[in-house]
Amino acid sequence: MTAPSQQKLKVKGPVVVTANRVVDGAVVYWTADREWSTDLANAAVVSTAPEAEALLAGARADGLHAVDCYVAPVARDQAGRTQPGNLRERIRFAGPTIDLLVTFGI
Amino acid sequence: MYRYDDFDRTLIAERVAEFRDQVARRLSGELTEEEFKLLRLMNGVYLQLHAYMLRVALPYGTLSSDQMRKLAHVARRYDRGYGHFTTRQNIQFNWIKLHELPDALAELAEAGIHAMQTSGNVVRNITTDQWAGVAPDEIEDPRIYAEILRQHSTLHPEFSFLPRKFKIAITAAAHDRAAVKVHDIGLRLHRNAAGETGFEVIVGGGLGRTPFIGKSIKPFLPARDFLSYIEAILRVYNQYGRRDNIYKARIKILVHELGAEKFAQEVEAEWVAIRDGQLALDQAVFADIAARFSYPNYLTLPDNPPELAAARKNKRFGAWLGNSVANHKVPGYAIVTISLKPVGAPPGDATADQMDAIAVLADRYSFGEIRVGHEQNLVLPHVAQRDLPELWRALDAAGLATPNIGLVSDIIACPGLDYCSLANTRSIPVAQELTRRFSDHEQARELGRLHINISGCINACGHHHVGHIGILGVEKNGEEFYQITLGGQADENAALGTLLGPAVPYAQVADTVEDVVKAYLELRERPDEIFLDTVKRVGIEPFKERVHAAE
C-alpha cells in the first residue's frame, strides 16, 4: 500500500499527527506543546482538515527528531481516552498482535 | 563455505565506517531524512511500523556456525532476541535502533556478514539452491557463479541506480529449489548435447502487483559468457526500464511491453559488443573463486548404517527422518532441513537461543555449516547418517524438529501488518492459526506436499501467487480480507494460482483453507496425487463448488 505519509489528507473525525522517532524508529505523536510524545494520550487531537494541516505543518518543521509524519485517525473510548482509529494505528500503538518469541520491554 | 580475503574484509569494514559517519550526520541533523533515506537503503536499513529494520545478506544462503552465533549475538544485544529468515536468503532484525546500527554492523562485519545488496535499486542478494554443493541432482555447485556475480555486482557503479531493485537466482539442479522463474533473472545450469555446461537464461519473472513467470530468452549460454550476458541484460534494463512509475519499473514490465523476443534482440546486440572483453570468464579466476569454497573432508561411510535402522523404531524419529532428511550426494551422509515452522509460531523466526543451538549442532554434526532456504527454513547440509538419531534428539529438545517440511503447515509468510509499513493486513496470525488447524503432522503427511504462501499486501513478499494455496490480504473499508488462489507453484513448472472466489474476512480464512483441503481429499484420484496435481487435473471449478457449498 501507499505509505500514509504519501496519501491525500482525509479528515472524517478526530485525528492526530504521528511519526517515527529518528533515533530508534519508535512511534511518536505530536502534542499541543509542539513536541513529540510516545504516549497517544498526550497527542493533540483535531477534527477538521485545516486544523490537521496546521498540526502536520508544525510537526514536519521538526525534521530532526521524527520522520514520516502523517495524519492518523483516532477515536475516544467511553472514558474519553484517545485510542488509535484503525488496525494499523492500533498495531503501531500497541505493538505486534502476536506473542513475540522473546519479550523485552518496549 | 566461502572464505573472504583481505579485499572483502576491507570492503565490508570501510562500508561500516562510511555508514557510521552517515548515521552520525543524520542524528546531528546535518543530513535530512530525504538525504539519509537513500543512504540507509543502501545498507539494508528500512523504517517499519515500530522501529528500524535491518536486513542482512546471507549470500546464496550459506553461513558458518560462527556467523550464526554472531547473528544470535546481534539479536540479543541490539534487537529483542530473535530474527526473521526471509524468502531471499536474508535475515531481518525488527527492532534495531538507529544510533546502535553502526555497532551492530561492525560486529556483523567481524564475522564477514554485511547488509549490502539487501535494499535499494541494485542487484540484490543473489540466491540459489539451499542444497547447493550437496544435492544429488546437481550438475555443479551454483554458488561459485553466485559468488562471482556477487563480487561483480557489489557497489557496481553502473548498476547502483537501476530503475528498480533487481533479483537474480541460480539453480544447477534438475529440480528448481530456488524459484528462478519468478526472479528478474533466473539462471538454470544444465548440460547441452555435447556435455558442456551452460545456462538457460530466464528474464522478467516476478510477483508483486503484476506477476509474471519469467521468459526464457537464451536456451544455452556457455558458462564463460554468463557475466557478460547478465551485464548486457542489466544495461538494456538500465537504459529502457521505466523510471517515471515505480509500479512499472521492474524488468518484468519492460520484457512484457517489448516482448521477450525483442528484448532478447536488444540484449544480444549489447552482448556481442562485450562478450569477448574483460567479462569473459577467465578459467583461472573461476578456479581461484571455486578454490575458496571449502568442502568438508567427508568420511567413507555406508548408506543406511545400523544406528539408523535401530532408531527408526521410534515413531517420532521415523516421522522426522521421512520428512526432513534428504539424500546427499556423498554416501553415508544426509541433508537435514530444520523447520522454522513450529505449530503456532511466526514462520521463519528463530530465537537467539535457537540460533546458538543450531550453531552448536552444525559444529557437531555438519562441519560447521548451515544454509537458509527460500522457504524460510534452515539446513544442515553435511550430516553423517549415523548421527541422525542424536541430532534429532538435540533438535527436538530445542523445538526444532517439527516434521512438517513441504507439508501444509510449512507456510511461507511475510511479516505483514504486525511489522511492515507497507502491509494492509496481517500475515503471521493467519499462518499461526493455519498451523494450529493442521497441527497433526501425521494427517498432514497423508495430505502430502502442499505449500501455503501468505502475503499481507499486493507486494507479494510471501509469494502468494506461487503457493499451491495462495493467500493475499486486502483491506476493505478498514477490515482485513483475504483472497485465496489455488494451483500456483514456484519450481521448474512455475505457475500463478487461480482465484477461488471473493475475498473472505480474517476470521474465515482458516475455515476456507480447511474446506479447500477437504475438497482436495474428495477430488484426488489416489492418495499420492498431490494437491497441485489435483488442481491441475480438475481445475478450479470443483473446488469453488465444494467450498461455497460448505459456507
Image: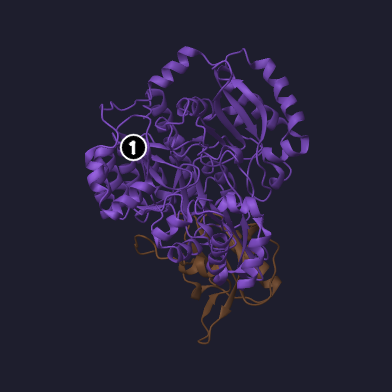
Subunit under mark 1: B
Q: Is residue B275 above or below residue B380?
A: above
**Is residue B95 toward the left or the right of residue B474 in the image?**
left
Q: Is residue B169 above or below residue B272?
A: below
Check disc 1 and report its element: helix, strand or loop: strand
Q: How many other residues sit within 10 Å of disc 1, few (<14), some (14-19) or many (≥20)?
A: many
Name the image quarter holding the C terminus of chain B.
Answer: bottom right
Residue type highlighted by circle 1? Ala
Q: Identify the residue at horizontal 48%, vertical 37% (top origin).
A: B116
Q: Which x, y percent locates residue B536? A: 63, 50
Q: Identify the residue at horizontal 60%, vertical 57% (top origin).
A: B457
**Is residue B242 toward the left or the right of residue B345 in the image?**
right
**Is residue B534 toward the left or the right of residue B317 in the image?**
right
Q: Which x, y percent locates residue B90? A: 46, 43
Observer-nearest of B382 and B325: B325
Q: Quadrant of residue B398?
A: bottom left
Q: Which residue is mark 1?
A: B334
Chain A tint as drawn: brown
Q: Which x, y percent locates residue B75? A: 35, 50
- The letter of the purple chain is B
Can residue B149 be seen in the rendering of this structure? yes
**Is residue B375 toward the left or the right of residue B367 in the image?**
right
* Extreme-front residue of the structure: B526
Q: Which x, y percent locates residue B145? A: 50, 25
| Number of numbered discs on residues | 1
Q: Identify the residue at horizontal 25%, vertical 54% (top origin).
A: B397
Observer-nearest of B67 and B401: B401
Name the image quarter holding the N terminus of chain B.
Answer: top left
Can residue A55 be seen in the rendering of this structure? no
